[in-house]
């Protein structure tokens, strides 16, 4: 997880530096004066850095509020750009007035918002596709089987889930999948050879593993039948204990699927 997040952080730093340099270069060329360089450098450095940092938080807030399982990536991207443009509009106008102080005055607020929204869409495309590599056209239309009904534990040796089944795999991880857990917007995959993180939806991972012996047992958990040691009842809650000692909660809405699959 550390290496994955470090890689994303480095990509964000590169994005901030590149976009700020690009906007400074464009603005200075338009002004055509060396006197404008300090103001443009200050304005775009602050605006781009603040904008990126806010958009990281806004994107994650939008995904958490709207639900990554209910909406496709492109809809979350558009919502992020439109919602994020609201605070950025006020900040851009304040920075323009404070640092640049254009002699012709500021444009109308609605025009600033429109311009910021367009820039936001471009930045969000970079954020989703190149930095976080968030899938834009996967997931929401697959809502009906958020889980796949697997085979009974007695038949679990027929189809074992492997890392190769996943369309988005943790880097450097191999082996047979034992169980998976959502952590924020990342999926932690546990195999018989270790564990690793990948940016993947649970619904998409469940679809990837639909033909294997496991199933989703909770909104944040998927488990292979072969990994199960026993299924317990603790304080009115059903718990799956795996062979390596992990305890996996069973969501109430998934209990019927466990019965249908012959797990209980």
Image: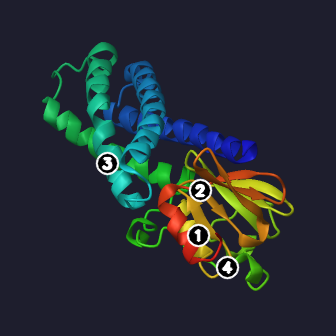
At a point 42% along the width and 59% down the height, the residue shown is: 73
| Circle nearer the viewer, 4 or 3 | 4
* Residue at numbered disc 1: 258
Q: Distance between the Cα atoms at labels 4 and 3?
A: 35 Å
Q: Residue at x 25, y 41 (%)?
A: 115
**4 or 3: tag closer to the N-terminus:** 3
Q: Which mark is residue 250?
A: 2
Dot 1 and dot 4 residues touching (CB under 8 Å): no
Mark in the foreground, 2 or 4: 2
Label 4 packing within 10 angstroms: few (<14), some (14-19), many (20+): many
Mark 2 or mark 4, which has the lower sequence index?
Answer: 4
Q: Residue 182 or 99: which is nearer the viewer?
A: 182
Mark 3 or 1: in front is 1
Instruction: Write the residue at 72% across / 46% down.
Output: 1
Residue 212 is labelled as 4
Cβ atoms at labels 2 and 4 below 8 Å apart? no
Return the disc, 1 or 4, that comes first in the chain's sequence.
Answer: 4
C-alpha gap between disc 2 and disc 4:
19 Å
Cα–Cα span, label 3 and label 2: 32 Å
* Total count of labels: 4
Query: Residue 102: x and y, percent?
Result: 23, 21
Please tell me whether mark 4 sits on a helix, a strand or a loop: loop
Residue 21 in the image, given as x and y percentages of width and height: 50, 36
Question: Disc 3 versus disc 1: distance between alpha carbons?
Answer: 36 Å
Measured as percent of width and height from the top left, residue 12 is found at 57, 40
For marks 1 and 2, give the CA distance.
9 Å
> Which residue was labeled with disc 3?
79
Q: Which quarter of the image is occupied by the C terminus?
A: bottom right
The x and y percentages for residue 98 are 30, 13
């Amino acid at each position: 997880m550390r290496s994955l997040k470090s890689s994303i952080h480095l990509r964000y730093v590169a994005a901030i530096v590149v976009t700020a340099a690009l906007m400074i270069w464009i603005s200075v060329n338009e002004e055509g004066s060396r006197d404008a360089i300090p103001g443009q450098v200050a304005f775009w450095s602050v605006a781009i850095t603040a904008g990126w940092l806010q958009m990281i938080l806004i994107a994650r807030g939008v995904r958490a509020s709207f639900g990554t399982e209910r909406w496709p990536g492109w809809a979350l991207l558009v919502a992020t750009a439109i919602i994020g443009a609201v605070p950025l509009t006020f900040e851009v106008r304040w920075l323009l007035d404070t640092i640049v102080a254009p002699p012709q005055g500021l444009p109308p607020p609605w025009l600033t918002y429109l311009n910021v929204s367009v820039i936001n869409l471009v930045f969000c495309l970079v954020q989703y596709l190149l930095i976080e590599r968030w899938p834009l056209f996967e997931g929401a239309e697959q809502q009906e089987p958020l889980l796949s009904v697997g085979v009974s534990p007695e038949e679990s040796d027929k189809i074992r889930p492997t890392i190769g089944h996943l369309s988005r795999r943790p880097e450097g991880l191999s082996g047979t999948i034992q169980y998976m857990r959502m952590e924020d917007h990342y999926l932690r995959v546990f195999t018989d050879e270790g564990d690793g993180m990948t940016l993947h939806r649970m619904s998409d991972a469940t679809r990837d593993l639909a033909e294997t012996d496991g199933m989703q047992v909770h909104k944040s958990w998927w488990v292979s039948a072969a990994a199960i040691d026993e299924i317990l009842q603790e304080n009115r809650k059903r718990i799956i204990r795996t062979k390596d000692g992990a305890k996996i909660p069973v969501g109430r809405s998934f209990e019927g699927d466990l019965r249908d699959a012959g797990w209980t």
